[in-house]
Amino acid sequence: MPTFNQIRSVLSQKTVGIAGAGGLGSNCAAALLRSGVGKLIIADYDVVSEPNLNRQFYFRDQIGQKKVFALADNLARIEPEDCVQVHDTKITEDNISLIYSTCDVVVEAFDEASEKEMFINYMLTHFPDKPLVAGSGMAGWGRLELLKSDNSGNLYICGDEESEVSENNPPLAPRVGIVSNMQADKVLELLLERKKLH
Amino acid sequence: MQIILNNRSETFKGQELTVSEIMELKSFRFKMLVVRLNDQLVKKEDYATTIVKEGDDLKIIHLVSGG
Protein backbone atom coordinates (compact mmCIF):
# COMPACT_ATOMS: atom_id res chain seq x y z
CA MET A 1 0.00 0.00 0.00
CA PRO A 2 1.23 3.52 -0.78
CA THR A 3 1.98 6.18 1.80
CA PHE A 4 -0.13 9.31 2.03
CA ASN A 5 2.72 11.28 0.46
CA GLN A 6 2.73 8.93 -2.54
CA ILE A 7 -1.03 9.25 -2.84
CA ARG A 8 -0.85 13.02 -2.62
CA SER A 9 1.87 13.25 -5.23
CA VAL A 10 -0.34 11.40 -7.74
CA LEU A 11 -3.49 13.31 -6.85
CA SER A 12 -1.71 16.67 -6.96
CA GLN A 13 -1.41 16.25 -10.73
CA LYS A 14 -5.15 15.68 -11.19
CA THR A 15 -8.10 17.89 -11.98
CA VAL A 16 -11.61 17.00 -10.81
CA GLY A 17 -14.75 18.81 -11.96
CA ILE A 18 -17.77 19.19 -9.70
CA ALA A 19 -21.14 20.19 -11.14
CA GLY A 20 -23.13 21.79 -8.34
CA ALA A 21 -22.04 23.11 -4.94
CA GLY A 22 -24.90 21.93 -2.72
CA GLY A 23 -24.96 19.02 -0.29
CA LEU A 24 -23.12 16.64 -2.59
CA GLY A 25 -20.74 19.09 -4.29
CA SER A 26 -19.60 21.11 -1.27
CA ASN A 27 -18.84 18.05 0.88
CA CYS A 28 -17.28 16.10 -1.98
CA ALA A 29 -15.02 19.07 -2.74
CA ALA A 30 -13.78 19.20 0.84
CA ALA A 31 -13.01 15.46 0.87
CA LEU A 32 -11.12 15.66 -2.43
CA LEU A 33 -9.12 18.69 -1.37
CA ARG A 34 -8.19 17.07 1.95
CA SER A 35 -7.01 14.02 0.00
CA GLY A 36 -4.66 16.14 -2.08
CA VAL A 37 -6.38 16.57 -5.46
CA GLY A 38 -4.42 19.28 -7.25
CA LYS A 39 -7.23 21.19 -8.87
CA LEU A 40 -11.00 21.41 -8.44
CA ILE A 41 -13.29 23.09 -10.96
CA ILE A 42 -16.66 23.87 -9.38
CA ALA A 43 -19.72 25.54 -10.91
CA ASP A 44 -23.02 26.63 -9.36
CA TYR A 45 -25.24 29.73 -9.59
CA ASP A 46 -27.02 29.42 -6.26
CA VAL A 47 -26.76 31.45 -3.06
CA VAL A 48 -26.23 30.03 0.45
CA SER A 49 -29.52 30.01 2.35
CA GLU A 50 -30.55 28.98 5.86
CA PRO A 51 -32.06 25.58 4.89
CA ASN A 52 -28.75 24.62 3.23
CA LEU A 53 -26.98 24.58 6.60
CA ASN A 54 -28.53 21.23 7.57
CA ARG A 55 -26.17 19.40 5.21
CA GLN A 56 -24.00 21.66 3.08
CA PHE A 57 -20.44 22.78 3.82
CA TYR A 58 -21.30 26.40 4.59
CA PHE A 59 -21.61 28.51 7.71
CA ARG A 60 -24.32 30.77 9.11
CA ASP A 61 -22.36 33.96 8.43
CA GLN A 62 -22.19 32.98 4.71
CA ILE A 63 -25.97 33.14 4.16
CA GLY A 64 -26.60 35.32 1.13
CA GLN A 65 -23.20 34.70 -0.45
CA LYS A 66 -22.81 32.95 -3.78
CA LYS A 67 -22.12 29.30 -3.03
CA VAL A 68 -19.04 28.99 -5.23
CA PHE A 69 -17.29 31.94 -3.57
CA ALA A 70 -18.26 30.83 -0.06
CA LEU A 71 -17.02 27.32 -0.88
CA ALA A 72 -13.75 28.64 -2.29
CA ASP A 73 -13.23 30.55 0.98
CA ASN A 74 -13.95 27.46 3.08
CA LEU A 75 -11.70 25.25 0.97
CA ALA A 76 -8.89 27.82 1.20
CA ARG A 77 -8.98 27.39 4.97
CA ILE A 78 -8.13 23.71 4.41
CA GLU A 79 -5.58 24.25 1.65
CA PRO A 80 -4.44 27.80 1.06
CA GLU A 81 -2.70 27.00 -2.23
CA ASP A 82 -4.70 28.08 -5.21
CA CYS A 83 -6.37 24.74 -6.04
CA VAL A 84 -9.94 25.79 -6.73
CA GLN A 85 -11.38 27.34 -9.88
CA VAL A 86 -15.00 28.42 -9.53
CA HIS A 87 -17.67 29.40 -12.04
CA ASP A 88 -20.62 31.42 -10.75
CA THR A 89 -22.97 30.27 -13.48
CA LYS A 90 -25.90 27.98 -14.19
CA ILE A 91 -24.63 24.85 -15.88
CA THR A 92 -26.31 24.22 -19.21
CA GLU A 93 -25.52 22.26 -22.35
CA ASP A 94 -23.93 25.45 -23.68
CA ASN A 95 -21.16 25.68 -21.09
CA ILE A 96 -20.45 22.12 -19.88
CA SER A 97 -17.64 21.56 -22.39
CA LEU A 98 -16.08 24.91 -21.65
CA ILE A 99 -16.03 24.30 -17.90
CA TYR A 100 -15.24 20.59 -17.60
CA SER A 101 -13.34 19.45 -20.71
CA THR A 102 -9.94 19.55 -18.98
CA CYS A 103 -10.99 17.41 -16.00
CA ASP A 104 -9.67 13.87 -15.40
CA VAL A 105 -12.91 12.90 -13.63
CA VAL A 106 -16.20 14.78 -13.26
CA VAL A 107 -18.66 14.60 -10.35
CA GLU A 108 -22.38 15.22 -10.93
CA ALA A 109 -23.67 16.93 -7.77
CA PHE A 110 -26.97 18.54 -8.70
CA ASP A 111 -30.12 18.56 -6.63
CA GLU A 112 -32.81 18.27 -9.31
CA ALA A 113 -33.27 14.97 -11.12
CA SER A 114 -33.88 16.78 -14.42
CA GLU A 115 -30.52 18.53 -14.12
CA LYS A 116 -28.82 15.24 -13.28
CA GLU A 117 -30.32 13.70 -16.39
CA MET A 118 -29.31 16.62 -18.61
CA PHE A 119 -25.73 16.61 -17.32
CA ILE A 120 -25.23 12.85 -17.46
CA ASN A 121 -26.66 12.60 -20.97
CA TYR A 122 -24.46 15.45 -22.16
CA MET A 123 -21.30 14.00 -20.63
CA LEU A 124 -21.95 10.47 -21.91
CA THR A 125 -22.61 11.84 -25.40
CA HIS A 126 -19.75 14.33 -25.65
CA PHE A 127 -17.14 12.88 -23.28
CA PRO A 128 -17.77 9.12 -23.31
CA ASP A 129 -14.21 8.37 -22.20
CA LYS A 130 -14.23 10.67 -19.18
CA PRO A 131 -15.26 8.97 -15.92
CA LEU A 132 -18.42 10.54 -14.48
CA VAL A 133 -19.46 9.97 -10.85
CA ALA A 134 -23.13 10.79 -10.22
CA GLY A 135 -25.36 10.72 -7.13
CA SER A 136 -28.95 9.49 -7.01
CA GLY A 137 -31.08 8.67 -3.98
CA MET A 138 -30.04 9.87 -0.52
CA ALA A 139 -33.08 11.43 1.19
CA GLY A 140 -34.05 10.64 4.76
CA TRP A 141 -32.03 8.57 7.21
CA GLY A 142 -31.08 4.95 7.87
CA ARG A 143 -31.31 2.13 5.32
CA LEU A 144 -27.56 2.31 4.88
CA GLU A 145 -27.58 -1.16 3.36
CA LEU A 146 -29.39 0.28 0.32
CA LEU A 147 -26.60 2.74 -0.49
CA LYS A 148 -24.42 1.39 -3.25
CA SER A 149 -21.99 2.32 -5.95
CA ASP A 150 -22.91 0.91 -9.34
CA ASN A 151 -21.38 1.49 -12.73
CA SER A 152 -22.05 1.13 -16.42
CA GLY A 153 -18.84 1.70 -18.33
CA ASN A 154 -17.50 5.12 -17.36
CA LEU A 155 -20.67 6.16 -15.53
CA TYR A 156 -20.65 5.55 -11.77
CA ILE A 157 -23.77 6.08 -9.64
CA CYS A 158 -23.65 6.45 -5.86
CA GLY A 159 -26.79 6.31 -3.71
CA ASP A 160 -29.84 4.07 -3.40
CA GLU A 161 -31.51 5.19 -6.67
CA GLU A 162 -34.88 5.48 -4.93
CA SER A 163 -34.98 7.86 -1.95
CA GLU A 164 -36.26 11.03 -3.56
CA VAL A 165 -36.20 14.30 -1.66
CA SER A 166 -39.61 15.80 -0.89
CA GLU A 167 -41.36 17.86 1.76
CA ASN A 168 -41.83 14.71 3.86
CA ASN A 169 -38.51 13.10 3.02
CA PRO A 170 -35.92 15.84 3.38
CA PRO A 171 -32.21 15.54 2.72
CA LEU A 172 -30.26 15.28 5.99
CA ALA A 173 -26.58 15.72 6.77
CA PRO A 174 -25.60 12.08 7.47
CA ARG A 175 -26.95 10.36 4.36
CA VAL A 176 -26.08 13.25 2.00
CA GLY A 177 -22.63 13.36 3.57
CA ILE A 178 -22.20 9.62 3.11
CA VAL A 179 -23.14 9.74 -0.58
CA SER A 180 -20.94 12.79 -1.23
CA ASN A 181 -18.04 10.94 0.35
CA MET A 182 -18.87 7.79 -1.63
CA GLN A 183 -18.52 9.95 -4.72
CA ALA A 184 -15.20 11.37 -3.50
CA ASP A 185 -13.95 7.87 -2.70
CA LYS A 186 -14.90 6.66 -6.18
CA VAL A 187 -12.99 9.59 -7.67
CA LEU A 188 -9.89 8.59 -5.69
CA GLU A 189 -10.28 5.00 -6.84
CA LEU A 190 -10.46 6.13 -10.47
CA LEU A 191 -7.48 8.48 -10.17
CA LEU A 192 -5.27 6.12 -8.20
CA GLU A 193 -5.99 2.75 -9.76
CA ARG A 194 -4.51 3.68 -13.10
CA LYS A 195 -1.24 4.48 -11.38
CA LYS A 196 -0.95 0.99 -9.85
CA LEU A 197 0.32 2.34 -6.56
CA HIS A 198 -0.46 -0.83 -4.68
CA MET B 1 -34.61 -14.42 -24.22
CA GLN B 2 -32.28 -13.93 -21.32
CA ILE B 3 -30.59 -10.59 -20.64
CA ILE B 4 -28.75 -8.89 -17.82
CA LEU B 5 -31.00 -6.15 -16.44
CA ASN B 6 -29.44 -3.96 -13.77
CA ASN B 7 -26.82 -6.62 -12.96
CA ARG B 8 -29.39 -9.41 -12.64
CA SER B 9 -30.25 -12.14 -15.09
CA GLU B 10 -33.82 -11.77 -16.37
CA THR B 11 -35.84 -13.88 -18.80
CA PHE B 12 -38.45 -12.41 -21.12
CA LYS B 13 -40.78 -14.08 -23.58
CA GLY B 14 -39.85 -13.59 -27.22
CA GLN B 15 -36.59 -13.14 -29.09
CA GLU B 16 -36.37 -9.38 -28.86
CA LEU B 17 -38.04 -6.44 -27.15
CA THR B 18 -37.60 -2.69 -27.32
CA VAL B 19 -36.28 -0.73 -24.35
CA SER B 20 -39.78 0.79 -23.96
CA GLU B 21 -41.40 -2.64 -23.83
CA ILE B 22 -39.00 -3.82 -21.15
CA MET B 23 -39.66 -0.68 -19.08
CA GLU B 24 -43.40 -1.35 -19.38
CA LEU B 25 -43.05 -5.01 -18.42
CA LYS B 26 -40.86 -4.19 -15.43
CA SER B 27 -43.00 -1.18 -14.40
CA PHE B 28 -40.13 1.32 -14.51
CA ARG B 29 -42.08 4.53 -14.23
CA PHE B 30 -39.51 7.02 -12.96
CA LYS B 31 -39.44 10.09 -15.15
CA MET B 32 -35.70 10.71 -15.04
CA LEU B 33 -33.61 7.84 -16.28
CA VAL B 34 -30.32 6.99 -17.85
CA VAL B 35 -30.47 3.92 -20.06
CA ARG B 36 -27.35 2.08 -21.14
CA LEU B 37 -27.41 -0.89 -23.49
CA ASN B 38 -24.11 -2.78 -23.54
CA ASP B 39 -22.47 0.32 -22.02
CA GLN B 40 -23.80 2.61 -24.76
CA LEU B 41 -26.16 5.46 -23.95
CA VAL B 42 -29.71 5.07 -25.28
CA LYS B 43 -31.41 8.44 -25.67
CA LYS B 44 -34.98 8.97 -24.54
CA GLU B 45 -36.24 9.43 -28.09
CA ASP B 46 -34.76 6.05 -29.01
CA TYR B 47 -36.35 3.93 -26.24
CA ALA B 48 -39.20 2.85 -28.52
CA THR B 49 -36.94 1.80 -31.39
CA THR B 50 -33.89 0.34 -29.63
CA ILE B 51 -33.98 -3.46 -29.73
CA VAL B 52 -32.74 -5.57 -26.83
CA LYS B 53 -31.64 -9.10 -27.73
CA GLU B 54 -30.49 -12.30 -26.05
CA GLY B 55 -27.40 -11.79 -23.95
CA ASP B 56 -27.57 -7.99 -23.89
CA ASP B 57 -26.56 -6.00 -20.83
CA LEU B 58 -29.23 -3.38 -20.09
CA LYS B 59 -29.02 -0.81 -17.33
CA ILE B 60 -31.94 1.42 -16.44
CA ILE B 61 -30.64 3.86 -13.83
CA HIS B 62 -33.13 5.92 -11.80
CA LEU B 63 -32.30 9.54 -11.17
CA VAL B 64 -34.11 11.00 -8.20
CA SER B 65 -33.86 14.52 -6.79
CA GLY B 66 -31.64 15.28 -3.83
CA GLY B 67 -28.16 16.54 -3.33
Image (cartoon, coloured by chain):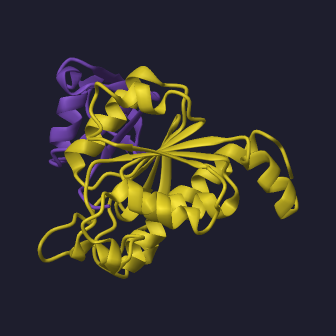
Is A174 displayed left or right of A102 in the figure?
Answer: left
Chain B representation colour: purple
Residue A147 visible (yes or no) = yes
Q: Compared to A183, does B29 lie above or below?
A: above
Q: Residue at x 87, y 62 (%)?
A: A3
Residue A1 visible (yes or no) = no
Is A96 displayed left or right of B16 in the figure?
Answer: right
Q: Residue at x 48, y 63 (%)?
A: A73
- Give whichever of A87, A125 is nearer the camera: A87
Is A104 displayed left or right of A60 in the figure?
Answer: right
Q: Compared to B1, does A77 lie above or below?
A: below
Query: Residue B25 occupies which quadrant of the picture?
Result: top left
Chain A representation colour: yellow
Count all numbered tags in the image, as a single digit: 0
Point out the residue furthest to the left here.
A167
Q: Residue at x 60, y 35 (%)?
A: A104
Q: Residue at x 23, y 70 (%)?
A: A49
- Give whichever of A17, B40 is nearer the camera: A17
Is B10 displayed left or right of B22 in the figure?
Answer: right
Q: Position of residue A164 (x, y in %)?
A: 22, 63
Q: Position of residue A75 (x, y in %)?
A: 54, 63
Query: Residue A63 occupies which quadrant of the picture?
Result: bottom left
Q: Compared to A196, does A28 lie above or below?
A: below
- Give whichever of A74, B26 is nearer the camera: A74
Query: Residue A15 occupies which quadrant of the picture?
Result: top right
Quadrant of the image containing the N terminus of chain A: bottom right
Q: Position of residue A53 (x, y in %)?
A: 31, 77
Q: Position of residue A89 (x, y in %)?
A: 30, 41
